[in-house]
Image: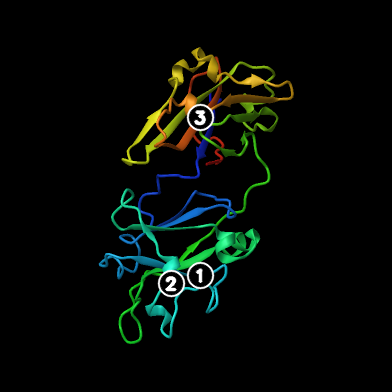
Amino acid sequence: MKSIITLLITFSLLSAKVFGQASWIEPENPDVTKPIRIYVDLSKTTNKSCSDSTGPFYIWTWSPKEHPIGHPLVNGTGEKAWQNSNDALKMTNDAAKGPLVWYYEMTPTEFYEVPAADVYKKGISLLVKTKNGGGYGDPDVKTEDLTFTIEPPKTDRGSMYASPSDMVQNEVVNLIYDNTKELNPVMKNLVNEELYMWVNASIKDTVTGIIRTFAPSSFLTINQNQDLRLVYDGSGKYRLSMIPNKIFNITSPNDLITQVELVVYMKSITDRSDGQPKIKFSCQ
């Protein structure tokens, strides 16, 4: 009997990318009024002209808005701007993700000086190039055009959400399961049911880059851990209050939670289900 709700939470400083992907944004589904990182793996781009260079590399961007000549974030300067990228657009190498993985960090609404709605509507378009991008009779040293589509935030929180929505590792967060919005027939209309939340975290050592996982209880023994029992509030909602650092036994300031999987289930049922609702929260 399938009776499990699986919730995948991906935190702001997500460390794992989709393998084989040439470019991506972290965090996924970001709030464009907050900092993001735009990653490009030059070993996987279609145009390989940058892969033979040691860098540094620069972004050259035009959407949702291209800055004019004289602006501090203009793409390039001088008479031949393509051959003199703006140092303010220099990317950073992330060797932990790959020798040819580079990123640029920005807050989109501030960088492009546009409202969030424009970023969601137009997306972000750019390419990556060397400072002197060639041209003017020489071969261009650049990637193909890269476009990032960013979905606007959902206004419906669904059956599971966090409060506050921006999780902080060393502060209390409330994980809410709203049973009144449940779509799974087996889990509908629960009143003061004994529910537990299995939690499993991926934790990255930001010094060594090593990622480990930690679960305070195994899936089959979760009902023996009262710290993970949900509290019913009488209105159809269940709550688990926790401090991430405490529940995941984090003591080092170098440890960063990158991903958390949560599973809510009834005490009497221990089978695990795939394809259940998934949502994403941020962590700062």
In the displayed orientation, state which residue is furthest to the top.
Answer: 224
User: Circle 2 sits on which residue?
Assistant: 86
9 vs 257, nearest the viewer = 257
Q: CA distance from mark 3 to mark 1?
A: 38 Å
Q: CA distance from mark 2 to mark 1?
A: 7 Å
Residue sitting at x 35%, y 63%: 45
Q: CA distance from mark 3 to mark 2?
A: 40 Å
User: Circle 1 sits on which residue?
Assistant: 73
x%, y% of residue 177?
63, 29
- State if disc 1 and disc 2 touch (CB < 8 Å): yes
Which numbered circle lies on residue 244?
A: 3
Q: Amino acid at mark 3?
A: Pro
x%, y% of residue 260?
48, 34
Can residue 272 be seen from the camera position used here? Answer: no
- Mark 3 is surrounded, within 10 Å at the Cα level, by few (under 14), some (14 to 19) or many (20 or more) other residues, namely some
Report the mark closest to the observer, 3 or 1: 1
